[in-house]
Amino acid sequence: MKKTDKKTRSKFSTALVMILSTCIVITLLSAPSALLIRKYSRLRELLKDIPVIGAPLGEFVDNNNFFNPTEAPTEAPTEAPTEAPTKAPETTKAPETTKAPETTKAPETTKAPETTKAPETESTTSSAQLLKKNQAILKNYNDIVNTAKISGSRPGFTKATYRGLSWDFFGGILYKNTAANNAEYFVSEGDAKASPVVVGKGVANAELCIPNKPYASLLDDEDADAVAEAVKSATKEDLGNGMFKITIVLNDEENPAPISANAKTADNFTSKMFPVITAETFRKGMDNDDVEGVSLTYTDCTVELVYNSMTGEIVSLKQMVKYKASVEQGFWPTAVGTVSETSEYYNFIY
C-alpha cells in the first residue's frame, strides 16, 4: 500500500511539473507573439501608402496586387513597349507630309512642246500659205522670162547646153555606146562653154527656155491646182543690191510629152517649163534593135533665175533637167540610165 502511494505521488508530481513548464513556455511565447503581430499590422498599414514604381495607378490602392509584385512588372513592360513603338511610326510620318517632289512638278506644268503644236494645228493653213507663196514666186518668174522672150527689146545672151549620162549595174552593156553614138546630144560642159550659142539683142529668142516657142513658161501661176500639181518647192532669196534669186523645183513626172509645133499649151507640166523628149526618141538614140521598151521619168527639174528687181532684167538663168530612162531588153533585167541636162544663160544684154 505504501509503495503504491509513493508511485502515485511521483507520477502526479511529474505531471504537475510538465503542466507548469508548459504554461511558463506559453506565457513566455504569448507576449512577444502578440507584440510581433501588432507590429506587422502596423507595417502593413504604412506600406499601403507607398507607391510601387512602374505600377499602374490602380495598383496603389489594390491590396491584392501589392502583395503580388509579379503582376506589376509583367503588365508594365508589356503595355509600355507595345504602345510606344507602334505609335512612334505614326508620329514620325514626316516623309508623307514633306511631299516636296510632288509639289515640284514643274516639268508637268511646263509642257511647252505640247503647247507649241502650231505646225500641227496650222497644217492646213500652212499648206494654203505655201501654195500662195509658190504661186507668187512662179508669177515673178513668168513675168521676167516671158517679158524677156516676147518683148520688143529682146535681150541678147549666151547659152551653153551640156549633158551627161550615167547608168546602174545592169545598164553597163546597154548604155556604154549611147553617148558615143549621140555625140551631138551628149556634149561635155567644157565643150559647150567653149562653143556656146550667142544670141544678139533684138533677135527672135527661139533659144530661151523652151526652144522654138514664143514663150518661156506656160505654167499658169493663177491656177492653184496646176501649181500644186507641178511645183515641189519655190524660194526667193535676197542677194542684196536689188538682186534676187528665184529657185523653182518641179515634181517628178513620167513620160511628159513635148509641146507640139503649133500648140500654145501642154498637157504635161514639165514641158511647160523645160524642154523634154519622148521615150521613143531616146530609144532610137540608143541605136539598139534589141531594146523592147523605154520609159522616161523626169525628176527634180530645177530652174534658177537671178534678176535685178529694180529693172526687171535677167542677170543669169540656169535650167537643170534630169530624167531616168528605164530600158527593157529580152531576159536582161531592167536597166536604168540617168541623163543630166543643164542649160546656162548668161551675158544678158538689154
Image (cartoon, helix red, strand yellow):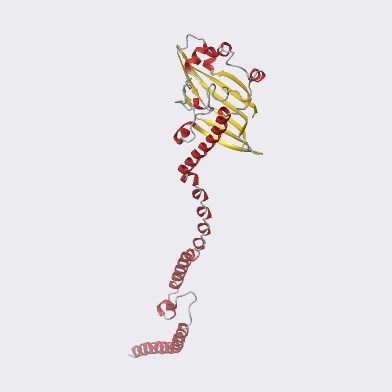
Give the percent coordinates (x, y) of residue 4: 34, 88
Residue at 48%, 32% in the rendered image: 220
Quadrant, the C terminus: top right
The image quarter containing residue 338 is top right
Q: Is residue 338 left or right of residue 189?
A: left
Furthest-left residue in this view: 1
Residue 91 against residue 53 in the figure, above or below: above
Q: Residue furthest front?
A: 152
Q: Nearer the viewer, residue 201 or 49?
A: 201
Q: Nearer the viewer, residue 154 or 113?
A: 154
For the view shown, which residue lies furthest in the top direction? 289
Q: Quadrant of the N terminus?
A: bottom left
- Does 18 sit left or right of 299 as displayed? left
Q: Is residue 21 shown above or below 122? A: below
Q: Position of residue 289 (x, y in %)?
A: 48, 8
Q: Position of residue 30 (x, y in %)?
A: 43, 88
Q: Is residue 56 above or below residue 148?
A: below
Q: Is residue 180 above or below residue 189?
A: above
For image coordinates 48% across by 80% down, the residue present is 51
Between 192 and 340, the one lying in front of the other is 192
